[in-house]
């Protein structure tokens, strides 16, 4: 690999799910597994046509991620075919991270072993909670026991880079439930833990229930209290926070996501997949049938695209970097955008003086600002393209 070659990340969206969770607005569909062979054909065609259309000679593959939906609904030989096509796009990095999401109770030991032998080296398990009533509320179809047994199987299959996702601030959840979930998970010792505050997304069943007054979300103070407790607890348990929702043992941070957050280019395949390449962002049709017929008829499934202007890039850098524990590199920002934030945003930095820190040339969110990260970022972002 030449030193001038640039990293590239690849994402494949697998939209199939066994059941729809009440809170989820990711593109996922239920009862369509019979369409998997046709989906596979379209994805392989999309990869092949991208190879013909793009000049990837200056890139090497750094990370690959199969996300969903539920990637474990694809058979190992399906994933193998997609991987083979992806690896044909350009050079492979020396130490690629190849990850996939799985749902508890849905990946057999035989399949996990097969995923491993394909070269998949990172598994992310959507455990969400170990409390039966909270799993039921979220209409998860797995039990806590399935999370434990799937985790064991993942280890038996030989994976040494495992992530578990938990959700907090779920109606019906107390701080004690949250502490019990965190303790239980830390005892299992995964390499990476993601914790998400339950978000009410438009178009979900949860949104309808909240709107109709049938469900009341937790008070904001309880939500932020659970967040701060979780972050402190995980830090002291050996999982430093490296991004608002992500904690890892040092060296096990998710490279694929870090690439997204630090401006590395990526290609996306499958319905609803996004790409960021050549200064443009594009996104695919968010409908399986629409995606497949568009691939068949036109050889493309792009729904729309936008050119990333310096104005957009500037704001995105503030938004994503302030979510990272390491913060925003002020000299990188000023080199890229010819703007000294310490001067242009002096009044905002003064407004958030207790919530922001400047350390070794990085602007970062202090403990007092954890719960206000989005608010602080939007204050710092420019409203006009001046
Ligand atoms: C979209 S899922 C895909 C992986 C897998 N199907 C699963 O459920 O874990 C990825 C992560 O996003 C989380 N997620 C999706 N919608 C969310 C929401 N509204 N609030 C918080 N977390 C959410 C999921 O629970 C999961 O941990
Ligand atoms: S949270 Fe995961 S399992 Fe549930 S509907 Fe979304 S993608 Fe499917």
Image: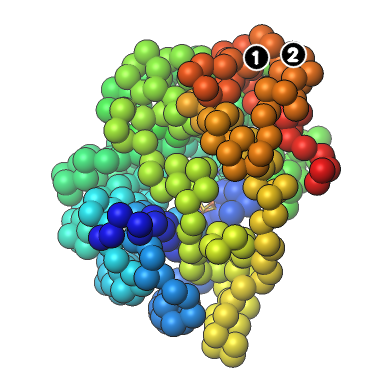
Which residue sits furthest top? 354
Residue 92, numbered circle: none
Q: Residue at x 34, y 16 (%)?
A: 237
Q: Which mark is residue 350?
A: 2
Q: Tell me which label, 1 or 2, sits earlier in the chain.
A: 2
Query: Which structural element holds mark 1?
Result: loop
Q: Is residue 140 left or right of residue 248?
A: right
The residue nearer to you, when weighing 378 against 60, is 60
The x, y position of residue 174, in whole percent, is 56, 18
User: Which quadrant holds residue 115?
Assistant: bottom left
Residue toward you, 361 or 316: 361
13 left or right of 304 in image: left
Q: In the drawing, does residue 343 fall left or right of residue 2?
A: right
- The tag on residue 355 is 1
| Marker count (numbered) | 2
What SS does tag 2 mark? helix
Residue 267 image point, x, y percent: 48, 64
Nearer mark to the viewer, of 1 and 2: 2
- Residue placed farthest to the bottom in the image? 297
Q: Measuring from the top left, give residue 88's x and y in whole percent.
A: 31, 74
Can you tell which quarter of the image residue 61 is in?
A: bottom left
């Amino acid at each position: 690999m030449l030193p001038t070659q640039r990293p590239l990340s690849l994402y494949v969206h697998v939209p199939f799910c066994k059941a729809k969770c009440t809170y989820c607005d990711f593109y996922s569909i239920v009862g369509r597994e019979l369409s998997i062979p046709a989906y596979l054909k379209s994805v392989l065609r999309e990869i092949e046509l991208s190879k013909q259309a793009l000049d990837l000679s200056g890139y090497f593959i750094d990370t690959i991620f199969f996300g969903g939906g539920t990637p474990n609904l694809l058979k190992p030989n399906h994933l193998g075919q997609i991987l083979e096509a992806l690896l044909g796009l350009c050079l492979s990095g020396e130490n690629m991270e190849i990850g996939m999401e799985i749902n508890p109770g849905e990946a057999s030991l035989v399949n996990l072993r097969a995923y491993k032998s394909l070269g998949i080296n990172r598994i992310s398990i959507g455990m969400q909670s170990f409390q039966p009533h909270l799993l039921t509320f979220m209409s998860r179809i797995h039990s806590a026991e399935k999370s434990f047994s799937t985790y064991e199987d993942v280890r038996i299959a030989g994976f040494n880079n495992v992530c578990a996702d938990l959700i907090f601030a779920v109606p019906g959840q107390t701080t004690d439930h949250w502490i019990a979930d965190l303790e239980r998970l830390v005892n299992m010792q995964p390499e990476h833990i993601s914790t998400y505050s339950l978000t009410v997304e438009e178009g979900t069943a949860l949104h309808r229930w909240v709107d109709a007054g049938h469900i009341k979300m937790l008070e904001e103070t309880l939500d932020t209290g659970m967040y701060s407790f979780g972050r402190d607890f995980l830090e002291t348990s050996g999982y430093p926070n490296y991004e608002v929702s992500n904690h890892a043992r040092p060296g096990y941070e998710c490279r694929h996501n870090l690439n997204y957050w630090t401006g590395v280019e990526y290609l996306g395949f499958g319905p609803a997949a996004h790409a960021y390449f050549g200064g443009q962002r594009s996104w695919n049709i968010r409908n399986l049938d629409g995606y497949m017929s568009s691939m068949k008829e036109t050889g493309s499934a792009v729904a729309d695209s936008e050119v990333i202007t310096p104005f957009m890039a500037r704001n995105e850098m503030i938004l994503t970097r302030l979510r990272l524990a390491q913060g925003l590199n002020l000299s990188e920002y000023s080199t890229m955008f010819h703007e000294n934030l310490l001067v242009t945003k002096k009044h905002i930095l003064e407004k958030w003086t207790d919530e922001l820190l400047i350390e070794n040339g990085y602007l970062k969110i202090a403990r007092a600002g954890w719960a206000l990260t989005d608010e602080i970022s939007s204050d710092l972002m420019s409203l006009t393209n001046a």
